[in-house]
Amino acid sequence: QRSRPYNFSAGPGALPEELLLHVAAQLADFEGTGLSIMEMSHRDEGGPVQRTIQQATSTVRDILEVPASHAIIWQQGGAHGQFAAVPLNLLGDKRSADFVDTGVWSRKAMSEASKYCETRVVASSEASGHSEIPAVSSWDLSDDSAYVHICANDTIYGLEFLEDPDVGDRLLVADFTSTLLSRRVAFSRYVAVYCSSGKNLGPAGVCLVVVRRDLLGRARPDTPCILDWGASANTAPVPSLVNTPPVFSIYMCLEVMRRLQEEWGAGGGSALAALESRAEERARRVYEEVDGSGGFYVNSVAWPYRSRTTVCFTFGADSGLVREWNGSITATVEPTELEAQFAAESRARGMLQLGGHPAFGGVRVCLYNAVPDAAVDELLRFMREFREAHS
Ligand code: PMP
């Protein structure tokens, strides 16, 4: 008998039940102080808030094996804030930036950056219907651009960089919002990696930014202070005290990472290696169910780019998934009959949020770390039964 439904949400994503209960017990009285962490000052030198930020930052360095060359900061405004922060911090006197288009989120990043510079699409998965990421050797990179931007996982089309591209001396930046904590990351290939919380990292409300130190302090003069990476990195005694930080979100990220280390191994990248094979194995099981369904379920993404965190599929090849996108993510599409039935029947079996994105349709199975293995087993049983009942 399970107490909670299985949550396959695309974000904010599932959080472990035991962690929620642990935090609930701490909420009104943080470590015997008589106060909640949410009602304490971030200016209290060495106090609980600064200690929490310090521990969260060092746990990120430890669990992700972030090299000393890179600083770790926490900013607000989610990934959308970083869509602007990246050009503001990196353009310098350059006038353009290069983007690899792998679907919705890389285009959102590009659209925000276009307020500050010329944006060039150097490669695109569009011609393949978002089923393949063009090889780095084919990217039309410009010597005049300040940086190259990729989105590690497009959560709409389920298209993921499972390896970190090598762009030589060019400055590579990546949106790791839905990939972080699902695989090891070669930080030496990136000058900046950002990850909005709300997926594997914790609840929404804060954005983790890992940035190469030699690129700090280059922000344009008109950069809002809260998006200036150098300003955030240089506050003392802990980073990210430019303004009142989102204390509760950072505290939750710390609790999530601590729990991952307890469960999967502390230090030296051991948790991440274990999480990576788990993510690989769980996604593979769902893709095999899709591929073995005789065309009832369809995923057209090629294996080397199939997302491990957002497994997307449609019913038959003539799908409900919108592939020609008009730029709006607030529009809604009517689910097809099978999509609506799949969502309703899975909900009735205690599996929640198995629909597609409201603006794109299809089905998305999000396998973030807090989704239990038993949820994947139950989903596979359900997918089999649903196919038999409806084909
Ligand atoms: N990038 C990716 C890959 C995402 O999946 C999302 C959110 N779903 C975002 C960026 C946007 O994040 P935020 O809402 O925190 O700005």
Image (cartoon, rainbow, N blue to C red):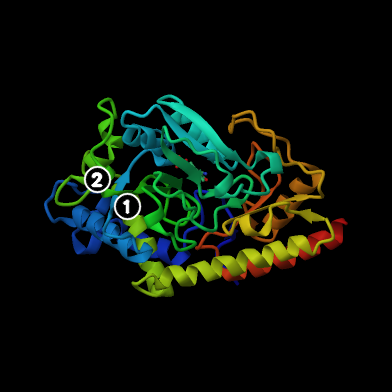
Q: Position of residue 30 (x, y in %)?
A: 25, 59
The image quarter containing residue 35 is bottom left
> So how many labels did they put on this image?
2
Q: Is residue 244 visible?
A: no
Q: Which residue is mark 2?
A: 240
Give the amino acid at mark 2: Ser
Residue at point 29%, 58% (across, down): 56
Circles 2 and 1, Cβ within 8 Å, touching? The answer is: yes
| 284 relative position to 314: left or right | left
Q: Is residue 322 visible?
A: yes
Q: Helix, strand or loop at disc 1?
A: helix
Residue at point 59%, 29% (across, down): 328
Residue at point 65%, 32% (across, down): 325
The image quarter containing residue 263 is bottom left
| 236 relative position to 168: left or right | left
Give the amino acid at mark 1: Ile
Q: Mark 2 vs mark 1: which is more N-terminal?
A: 2
Foreground pick, 209 / 380: 209
Foreground pick, 109 / 373: 109
Q: Which residue is mark 1?
A: 250
Disc 2 to disc 1, how far (Cα)? 11 Å
Q: Helix, strand or loop at disc 2?
A: loop
